Image (tube, grey):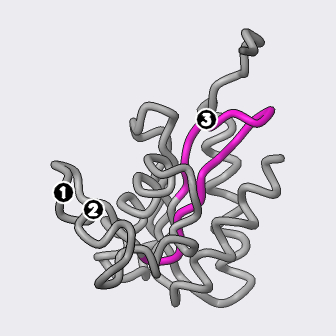
Amino acid sequence: MSTTAVTPLTIQDAEALVTAARQAAEAAGVTVSVTVLDAGGHLLAFRRDDRAVLISGETSTRKAYTALQLDAPTADLVEAVQPGGLFHTLPTALDRPLLFIAGGVPVHRDGRLIGGIGVGGGAPEQDHAFATAAVEALA
């Protein structure tokens, strides 16, 4: 077992993630909300474009939480919650709701899970692309 300390997600990291996701969305002409959570699921940064649909604030946060809890992009989990899927009952099994729509991506550093980012407001595949671009920019 490795005992090497991994630097946690900082507020500077969180702000860089928000900025990168918003720049990717702006380049595509999409208004979004972006949520960044630390490894414990606590809010580090949030930004909703004033023209983004109101529900995008909630969806971005739930996507970030889902990606963090399952350590997987929400885009990869959509099939798992369909009837007969491995996680079919999971969306309603927890106190804090999960959201299995593309746009949530876990954030890793040195192979360790340090947080999650969620983007809402565009089409699911757009939100996934914006979140992925932000994580790649941070790396």
Residue 71 percent location from the top left of the image? 55, 50
Callouts 1 and 2 close, C-beta under 8 Å: yes
Screen quadrant of the N terminus:
top right
Mark 3 residue crowding within 10 angstroms, few (<14) / some (14–19) / many (20+)? many
Dot 2 amino acid type = Leu
**What are the residue bounds of the magenta stretch?**
101-117
**Residue 133 sits in quarter:** bottom right
Between residue 108 and residue 76, name the one nearer to us.
Answer: 76
**Residue 81 sits in quarter:** bottom left
Residue with the mark numbered 1 = 93
Callouts 3 and 1 close, C-beta under 8 Å: no
Dot 1 amino acid type = Ala
Q: Residue at x 76, y 36 (%)?
A: 111
- State the SS at label 1: loop
Mark 2 residue crowding within 10 angstroms, few (<14) / some (14–19) / many (20+)? some
Residue with the mark numbered 3 = 114
Residue 90, labelled with which disc?
A: 2
**Residue 56 sits in quarter:** bottom left
- Main secondary-structure element of the magenta-colored stretch: strand
